[in-house]
Image (spheres, helix red, strand yellow):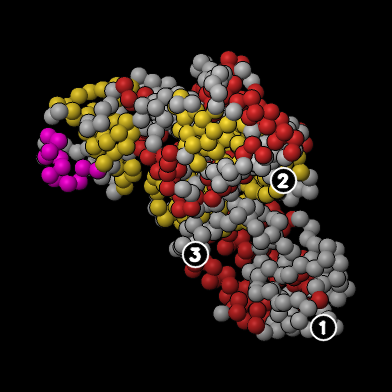
Amino acid sequence: FWLKRLLSHPCPPRMWPRALGGLSAAAHQVAAVRPPAFVALASLRVASSTASFSSASSSGDAAHDTWWRRSAPGSPNPMGRRPTGPKGGSPPAALDPGAPAGRLKKKRGGPQPGLPVDEEEGGSYCGDGSEDEGLEGLGVPLDAVVKVWCVHSMPNFSLPWQKKRQFRSSGSGFCISKEKRVILTNAHCIEWAAQVKVQRRGSDTKHLAKVESVGWECDCAVLSVEDDEFWEGIQVVQLSKKVPHLEEPVLCVGFPVGGDTISVTSGVVSRVEVMTYAQTCAELLGIQIDAAINSGNSGGPAFNSAGECLGMAFQSLGADQAENIGYVIPTVVIMHFLNDLLKHGKYTGFPTLGIDVQTMENAHLREAFGMAPKQKGLLVSRVAPTTAATKVLNAGDVLLSFDKETIANDGTIQFRKHERVAFSWLVAQKYYGEPAELTVLRDGKELELRIEDFHPEESLVPVHLFGRSHEGPSYMIVAGLVFTTLSVPFLRSEFGEEWDCEAPVEIVHRVMNQRAQFKGEELVVLTQVLAHDLTVGYEDLENVMLVSINDITVKNLRHCLDIIEGCSEKYLRFSFQNNLVLVLKPEDAKKATAEALEQHSIPAATSPDLAEPAAALAASAPTTPTPA
């Protein structure tokens, strides 16, 4: 009532103490049902404005100056934020009585006509900086949050010999160690980074940063800054060791779109479950909240009522799907990423069993596989040949438990009281190189099995190309025929985000259902045919899978190059899916290759990784160091 009265009607100074008394009483009533961190914020706003208006009631013109100084951007003010004018200049046109009507729209919550304006000051809204100290009442280290600026230089997967036009983006990050100079942010904030800069809250300086390590599956990245000035007086975020419970309060801090200064939004924990991380489609534990998470919030911390970081904002559902649904990477996932760096000297990933499973919720199905009435588990329908589990698991096994933790018929395990999550979270908490114990039912007998060491599964169609000796797309050009390897980035480049609906059915089927049979296996695609006299009549062949060359089944792109270079036959016969055939003469093809490169301004016939000898490439490939 009193807030509405102050905003809607001219209020003489003699009425201000009474108005603030009403506001203070209302705030105390609200405090009885609000969480501590948010009570501090409400009390802080009332307290700061009370000091302002109490001094105003006793000193004429000085009161007006205090009113506008308390309305400076970024300072707490129960009357609402006042629109800011030019820095150090006169008030905005909408507040100037002589200004033409309609030049600036009056913002909601701003000053209303009839409220006093200090004519001598000319409506200057620049505070002295002291009011910013009141934000300490939030109980969170706001000065640990930084803005991350990135220049992205992304490869062109459709024209793999060149890159796309650079573009810029901004996100958020936060300091987790001042001594080791560590800043945490999202991996997608620095994806294909050509340059990364960070800017502290309230600073006008952007400092160059270096990407130290990236966890693509968990969407986490570690940055560092060499400039000593950046680390002077910076606060540090304390990571919580617990996964929050439902309805716990959340405070999200970052630099989202809609402004340049720091933003604070509040909400509660809505859900905790294993979810899909959009960056690489990995299945990891995630936290759903109802606080606003917009573009630019990515990489910013989410705090609990104790001021500890419970996770990092990273994705949200679009407004066309749902409202107020954002997602946070929990600290248990972040700590796994950081411990992986300490354990192996680099990021190795989150383990998976590499199996396809079927739920056992049907009673007849359980009976057919010899399960006792009280036994629970999952039916193993397929085991990927390149995983560690292929040595111990068979198709048709019933997986009863993992590391002594019982798996339910629906594929979940007990997480907390009244909470269950997918059993894949148990596997993901392991580290590569560690053993694991499995209990399976095979031919009606219960067996105890052991995986001696986890190692990553070979990906037939990579979701990303990071972490390789050559992080860009591989390609090879023969007489105008452009061959490349099949990957998800390539599919997005050719067919858009809905590639699973737009790409040829044969390609989508292989991506969804086929697994690598051996290390180094790749799917090779003829992506396009460049114009040349030798390729006349082959122009319609594009985005088709290469099966064999001269009846030799193709293993990968390097294998293709070796077959072509070692060909001693009269013809090069390329066999594609759907029994399509393309034939060239080897000598003519070699000559046409140089002409096509010159004609289309292509720097090289192969990507850098294919130009290197196979032995040198294997030697330069990153290897996992021995744990210290």
Mark carried by residue 166: 2
**For marks 1 and 3 on the same chain, the one whose residue lies earlier in the sequence:** 1
How many C-alpha atoms fall within 10 Å of the one at disc 1: few (<14), some, or many (≥20)?
few
Task: Provide the residue designation for mark 3.
Answer: 320
Task: Please state the horizontal and vertical placement of residue 158, each as a whole percent of the image.
Answer: 61, 43
Mark carried by residue 109: none
**For marks 3 and 2 on the same chain, the one whose residue lies earlier in the sequence:** 2
Q: Which residue is depicted at the point 34% across and 44% down?
A: 421
Q: Quadrant of residue 356?
A: top left
Front in this rendered view, residue 264 or 133: 264
Q: Which element carries disc 1, helix, strand or loop?
A: loop
Lateral position of residue 76 relative to residue 393, left or right = right
The magenta stretch spans which residues? 359-370
Mark carried by residue 100: 1
- Asked if 148 appears above or below 20 in the picture, the reply is above
> In the image, what residue type sits under mark 2?
Gln
Q: Which residue is depicted at the point 42% across and 41% down?
A: 578
> In the image, what residue type sits under mark 3?
Asp
How many C-alpha atoms fall within 10 Å of the one at disc 2: few (<14), some, or many (≥20)?
few
Q: Is residue 255 visible?
A: yes
How many C-alpha atoms fall within 10 Å of the one at disc 3: few (<14), some, or many (≥20)?
few
| Distance in Å between CA atoms under marks 1 and 3 | 39 Å
Front in this rendered view, residue 26 or 502: 502
**For marks 1 and 2 on the same chain, the one whose residue lies earlier in the sequence:** 1
User: Is 498 in the magenta?
Assistant: no
Q: Is residue 620 visible?
A: no
> In the image, what residue type sits under mark 1?
Pro
Q: Quadrant of residue 450?
A: top left
